[in-house]
Amino acid sequence: MNQMLQPNDVSQLEALLGDPWQSLNTTGFSAVVAADERHELLPAGETLLDQYQLNAQFVPLELGGRLASLNRLIAVMRCIFRRDPSLGLGYGASSFLAAANVWTAGHPAQQARVAAVLLSNGKLACAYHELEHGNDISRVECSAQLGQERLTLQGGKQVIANAARAQALLVYARTASGTGGRSHSQILLERTEASAGSLVDQPRYSTSGMRGIALGGVEFTQCDLPIENLVGNPGQGLETTLKAFQLTRVALPGMFSAILDTGLRLTLKHCRTRRLYNKPACELPQVRARLAESFVDLLLCDAFVSVAANAAHVVPAELNLYGSAVKALVPAVLVTAMDSLASVLGAHSYVREGEMAIFQKLLRDLQPVGFGHAARISCLMTLLPQLPMLAKTGWNSAAPAPEGLFALDWQQASLRFDRLALSSGGQDTLLAFLLTLSTQETPKGSCESEIFHLVRLFADELQALREQCAALPAQQTTARASPESFRLASRYSVLLCASACLGIWQTQQENTSDPFLAQPAWVLAVLLRLAALSGLTRQRLSAALTETLLDELTQRYLSRQSFDLARLPLAATAGWH
Ligand SMILES: Cc1cc2nc3c(=O)[nH]c(=O)nc-3n(C[C@H](O)[C@H](O)[C@H](O)COP(=O)(O)OP(=O)(O)OC[C@H]3O[C@@H](n4cnc5c(N)ncnc54)[C@H](O)[C@@H]3O)c2cc1C
């Protein structure tokens, strides 16, 4: 690897990717769109990421990698997702999905093997999905027969990223009959271990977005492997999955939110030069409102992701709540915001040529954030069984937040995969903070008093939710739950997000390097958006608030800074003007 590179440095990767608007840049927008048209993963992007050794970001420090903070990993991946989500998912993130399981339950030799594959720029495939069963992994049929010393894989997996080109595969396989929690296990295998004919690649699947990703299938026929390839204990597959995917359900929406950053930047660029009714389109009040709302949506998504990612370090036993809630809420907000921007761009959101062509690709690439890696509804389903206990024990007392929960500095203790849990046991540190805030005196200032009015509205909403969740019957906490029951989990996710935003705001007031985050405007705006999502208010952003947000947005646009909380510098270009 090139010793000059500093792979842990986000700005270094941004600089390597270079000017997105330079037509000769092999990792610029023109090249990205051209590769998408060819249904190919950006070749120069893959070479660059090999050179940068991106995979080291997925490997914990103890195993020789650079994975220290989940938020830092998300920030690195956003450099890629901002310009080519297919490259981000197809080159790297899909390997992280598989690896997280091995970091959670693999034995040291397996962890060392996976680290070696990744650190030599190899890929991992995460083979869960079977077309027949979708999100219902309890019915997965691909099986592993376990013997004393050997195991045998039999059956197929479909629509798997990098299935045919991954050095190693993590396979979710049936090891007992039935649909109970102990009927599946995970098997790790390197391709070279499979004897001839026992692992056959299936034809590639074609998709409307993420076109460059080699989505393939595999068919195992009497694939004989050592029993040591079992990850964890027999029957532990579902448990490991539910733990490891808590991390990835935060990380993936966090990475995908970078798509909204570029979508918003493109829309602003277009509206600053597009003249309608003899004025730049960005002067139209309706356009201004849409731009401001999308900016707020990006901030609230990032705040929720950042706090949930911190929770992975600070309160890992509660990540089972926050990971599912992020995956349930953030994708929906991102998709709605991009659709809103598409309607601002009109036909320019649809053309596959010219400088706006990248927008339609981003719009298509965003869609899997909602249905891939567990549908929104199945994340709500994992929250449902916990709601009655939370209502009875977790949402009763206010408590200050533990140190680091709302920090934005990425300085966290190492991830403790062994501390991930299936249930929070009725603990909910994030909502306890909302309760604490609701008992505080309203600070001075008109914006602040509006914020505290909304805090009390959310506290009342929590009280209502507590009563309804405490009375939730057991049959309403399964896949057969009614829409009203699913709605309880949605409302809970919104409350968690509100608490995350408020926590960041309060922490930034005490110690900030970014005055915008310490000021009340952004948090008032996110609370209004969230209150509207839960149906608590119909109040829209005022004209004054819209202008404050647009000032910030424009200033970041002109100085090439990211629109998320980190406000990171973007690659030098004359293209954003
Ligand atoms: C780009 C891309 C990459 C992928 N990479 C991988 C990979 O690497 N590995 C892998 O294993 N898979 C991968 N997949 C497959 C992906 O995970 C599946 O598409 C996903 O599991 C969703 O399957 P489905 O929509 O068919 O699920 P279904 O279960 O059929 O769900 C469809 C819809 O039904 C509804 N629904 C589901 N459950 C419930 C419920 N309990 N209550 C009410 N409604 C419900 C929801 O609206 C849901 O969106 C990838 C897919 C894409 C597009």
Image (cartoon, grey):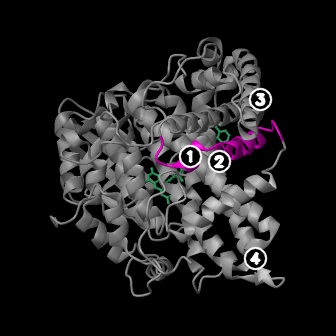
Q: Is residue 481 above or below residue 61?
A: above
Q: What residue is rendered at 32% in x and 51% in y?
A: 221
Residue with the mark numbered 1: 517
| Residue 522: image tag | 2
Please check the rendered image and state whether residue 517 is part of the magenta-colored stretch, yes or no.
yes
Please state the extent of the stretch shown in magenta in the rendering. Answer: 512-537
Residue where numbered disc 4 is placed = 281
- What amino acid does circle 1 point to? Leu
Of circles 3 and 1, the one toward us is: 1
**Tag 4–tag 3 contact (CB < 8 Å):** no
Between disc 2 and disc 3, the foreground one is 2
Q: Which mark is residue 420?
A: none
Label 3: few (<14), some (14–19) or many (≥20) C-alpha neighbours in 10 Å:
some
- To which residue does mark 3 refer? 457
CA distance separating discs 4 and 2: 24 Å
Using the numbered discs, state the Cα–Cα distance from disc 4 to disc 1 in whole angstroms.
28 Å
**Can the viewer see residue 421?**
no
- Could you give the CA–CA distance between mark 2 and mark 3, rounded to whole angstroms? 18 Å
Between the residue at mark 4 and the residue at mark 3, the CA separation in whole angstroms equals 36 Å
Residue 360 visible (yes or no) = yes
| Element at label 2 | helix
Q: Considering only order in the chain, which callout, 3 or 2, is on the residue closer to the N terminus?
A: 3
User: Which of pointers 3 and 1 lies earlier in the amino acid sequence?
Assistant: 3
